[in-house]
Amino acid sequence: MTIKDSLLMTMTNVVIERGRTQKNYWRDLWRFRELFYILAWRDVKVRYKQTVIGAAWSVIRPLLTTIIFTMVFSRVAKLGVPGDAPYAIMVFVGMLPWQFFATALSDSSNSLIGNSNLVSKVYFPRMIIPASSIIMGLVDFSISFFLLLVMFLFYQYVPDIKIFLLPFFVIMALAASFGIGLYVTALNVKYRDFRYIIPFIVQIGLYISPVGFSSSVVPERWRLLYSLNPMTGVIDGFRWCVLGQPLYWPGFAISCVIVVFFLWVGIAYFRKTERGFADNI
């Protein structure tokens, strides 16, 4: 079934009346769920279409970054690892949520522009588009997670039992990327300069987030301030689950508050500007 067919089938039961889209917006999100599935599946197929090595890019990118960060921070900067985990595993565990966040943010921020033909022609809750684009980040995350299991075997490392709590922190990373992504994609419709700003923000964020090093190296007096970065709590949570590294709970609480704040702001701003997307896009 095509996107057009899905929209036509759903629209046959939509009653157009004044103010209806505002009153029943969240109900319409559920009614158009088939469109969400189709858009998500399309993005997955298009991402690696006509590529030589296909989904292996989901492994190569974080693996190469892990090797570079391990050499720079472990061999050159001489930074240590809390606990007994190999440095490469510590870096890769931090790379997993960051790669998911960066992919989801980049894809969602450009999703409305990339689907301008849908936005400008037919009614459906526009939030479906950035939401479906995040699925690609989850697919890459799942593929990369299998590489982490291979690294456990290679280094003969047994993860902490708290690894079963990992889905909570995956949801936290999802909320952070979705909230910020909604806000940025709404801005991107009106101000096209943001499509050039996002890659720069992602690149800078990779180095200021505790991906290549443990956040424990940050001086104590700066830990709370450093935790204003929402990905700090997410990455520390991943390492707490998988490696058993100590979690700085005050900083983690701040990161959780920041994630919820961005999610609320992103949804509120997206809903406020949504009615003008068709005119501006």
Image (spheres, rainbow, N blue to C red):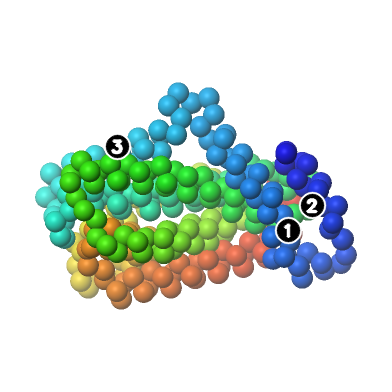
Structural crowding at the residue carrying mark 2, measured as other residues with C-alpha within 10 Å and reported as few (<14), some (14–19) or many (≥20): some
Q: Percent from the top left, x then y, of residue 104?
A: 49, 50
Residue 89 or residue 120, whichever sits in front: 89
- Looking at the picture, does residue 111 appear above or below residue 173? above
Q: Looking at the image, is mark 1 or mark 3 nearer the viewer?
A: 1
Specify the quadrant of the image occupied by residue 45.
Answer: top right
- Judging by the rendered image, the residue that carries numbered circle 3 is 64
Which of the two discs, 2 and 1, labels the residue nearer the N terminus? 2
Q: Residue drawn at (42%, 47%), measured in percent from left and top?
A: 141
Separation of residues labelled 3 and 2 (CA atoms): 44 Å
Residue 232 or residue 42, whichever sits in front: 42
Q: Quadrant of the N terminus?
A: top right
Residue 199 or residue 47, whichever sits in front: 47
Secondary element under disc 3, as helix, strand or loop, is helix
The amino acid pointed to by label 3 is Leu
Secondary element under disc 2, as helix, strand or loop, is helix
Q: Percent from the top left, x then y, of residue 30?
A: 69, 60
The amino acid pointed to by label 1 is Arg
Decide: marks 2, 1 in contact (CB < 8 A)? yes
Secondary element under disc 1, as helix, strand or loop, is helix
- Judging by the rendered image, the residue that carries numbered circle 2 is 10
Which of the two discs, 3 and 2, labels the residue nearer the N terminus? 2
Which of the two discs, 1 and 3, labels the residue nearer the N terminus? 1
Q: Percent from the top left, x then y, of residue 259?
A: 45, 67
- Judging by the rendered image, the residue that carries numbered circle 1 is 31
Q: Looking at the image, is mark 3 or mark 2 nearer the viewer?
A: 2
Q: Percent from the top left, x then y, of residue 132?
A: 59, 50
Query: What's the mark number on residue 178?
Result: none
- Looking at the picture, does residue 52 appear above or below residue 155? above
Q: Residue drawn at (32%, 42%), measured in percent from left and top?
A: 147
